[in-house]
Amino acid sequence: MKNNIQYFFDEQLKTWDFARNNYNALKKLKTKEFIVNGCEFKVQFNSARIASTGAKLDAKSIEERECFLCEENLPKEQIKMSFKEKYSIMVNPFPIFQRHFTVSGKSHIPQTINSRMGDMFDLAEFMSDYVIFYNGPKCGASAPDHAHFQAGNKGFLPLEKNWKKNITEKISEDLFVINYGFPAFLIETKDKKTGISLFEKMYRLLNIKKDEIEPMMNVLTWRENKEWISVVIPRAKHRPECYFVEGEGNMLISPASVDLGGVFIAPLEKDFEKMTEKHIENILNEVCLDEKDFQQLIENF
């Protein structure tokens, strides 16, 4: 099956100049590396991601624009692979990974993860060479009005490579605490039903903020040694203060699953050049739960 995904990717790039050029440009992107709280992080200067990072997500802006994930609004060059009859797998034309896909719901329904964790596990099994990730509607999703996942090739995110050595606590047989510069839940299970049950329990524990439709979170899931590995990252905040301040302190950084997975995306070169490990540490402290609030979740589990 993985070969079919690769074939699909290759065929798409043959026929879509815009996407092919953006993937070729990845080879020339500037990157730099840091160690933050003992964990590996990278920063990628990727100007093509400005549309996502700078997206206006207020209700009026979303209502006034066409949904770019609805089939009638897709570029004519974009081809689709059906998954479970309710999703379309498509090559993402604004890549971060060398192979980057969007998995879009065929229906225009809001971006939520509740009741779709089983789909995420199935997708991780279908795309076994990829990390599947979910950005909540105010946790990095540039289309909060349309349900979707994304997928990127394994071996790119530091979190995916280093998760085992960052486990700090065992909660139950298949549930752990991981700290990658921020506290998060980690599900490691051979049984899909167990994984779904654990996720649904933690989902119920998380607070839903006023005027939100679900708890703020990012989720990364993949298959490894016949197990599902899933990192669930509760969020305290959508965007850090540096996103909004004016002047020298401004940095257009809007963390999503990829950033929390260890690769910060800077769509502006000025931000890439000035970003340090201290900036990353401060941003993580702002947008993720602190240890005290996370410990309260564990106690209630």
Image (cartoon, rainbow, N blue to C red):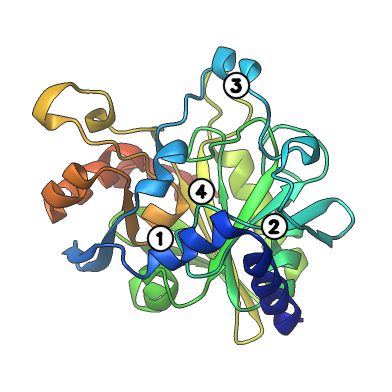
- Residue 150 in the figure: left or right of residue 285: right
Q: What's under tag 1, amino acid-wise?
A: Gly
Q: Position of residue 280 (x, y in %)?
A: 22, 50
**Residue 62 bears which disc, if any?**
3
* Whether label 3 touches label 2, CB < 8 Å: no
CA distance for labels 2 and 1: 22 Å
Task: Identify the mark nearer the N-term, 3 or 1.
Answer: 3
Q: What's under tag 2, amino acid-wise?
A: Met
CA distance for labels 3 and 1: 27 Å
* Whether label 2 touches label 1, CB < 8 Å: no
Q: Position of residue 139 (x, y in %)?
A: 48, 39
**Residue 218 bears which disc, if any?**
4
Is 144 rendered above or below residue 280?
A: above
Tell me, yes or no, if residue 125 can be seen here: no
Look at discs 4 and 2 and give the one toward the viewer: 2
Is 7 rendered above or below residue 152?
A: below
Q: Which residue is mark 2?
A: 90
* Whether label 4 touches label 1, CB < 8 Å: no
Look at discs 2 and 1 and give the one toward the viewer: 2
Residue at the spot x=54%, y=63% of the render?
20
CA distance for labels 3 and 2: 22 Å
103 or 288: which is nearer to us? 103
Task: Identify the mark nearer the N-term, 4 or 1.
Answer: 4
Task: Identify the mark nearer the N-term, 3 or 2.
Answer: 3
- Residue 33 in the figure: left or right of residue 294: left
21 or 6: which is nearer to us? 21
CA distance for labels 4 and 1: 10 Å
Q: What's under tag 4, amino acid-wise?
A: Asn
Tell me the SS state at disc 4.
strand
